[in-house]
Amino acid sequence: MLDFDEELKKFKPSLEVEQIEDAVYQEDLTDMTEILREMMRQSK
């Protein structure tokens, strides 16, 4: 049987996940609504 508390103590997040988090938080992500509005504006 697994001892979940013991396993959680051993857990270390991978460096890749942390790097992805940093990249996502630093990006200026455009909302889908903003994209659609811009497309509609350009089509007029």
Image: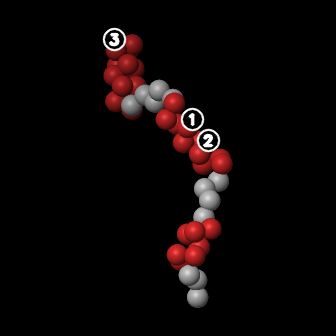
The quarter of the image holding the C terminus is: top left
Residue 10 got which mark?
Answer: none
Residue on which disc 2 sits: 19
Q: What residue type is disc 3 on?
A: Lys
Of the residues under marks 3 and 1, which one precedes in the sequence?
A: 1
Q: Are marks 1 and 2 in contact (CB under 8 Å)?
A: yes
User: What residue sits 55% from the left and 37% below the top?
Assistant: 22
Structural distance between the alpha carbons of marks 3 and 1: 35 Å
Secondary structure, mark 2, is: helix
Residue 10 seen in the figure: yes
Q: Residues within 10 Å of mark 2 (few under 14, many from 20)?
A: few
Image vertical order of residue 43 relative to residue 21, above or below: above
Instruction: Measuring from the top left, give residue 28's x and y in whole percent.
Output: 47, 26
Instruction: Measuring from the top left, give residue 42's x and y in whole percent.
Output: 39, 13
Image vertical order of residue 4 relative to residue 36, above or below: below
Q: Nearer the viewer, residue 43 or 14?
A: 14
Residue on which disc 1 sits: 23
Of the residues under marks 3 and 2, which one precedes in the sequence?
A: 2
User: What residue sits 58% from the left and 83% below the top?
Assistant: 2
Q: Nearer the viewer, residue 28 or 36?
A: 28
Q: Residues within 10 Å of mark 1 (few under 14, many from 20)?
A: few
Residue on which disc 3 sits: 44
Q: Nearer the viewer, residue 11 or 42?
A: 11
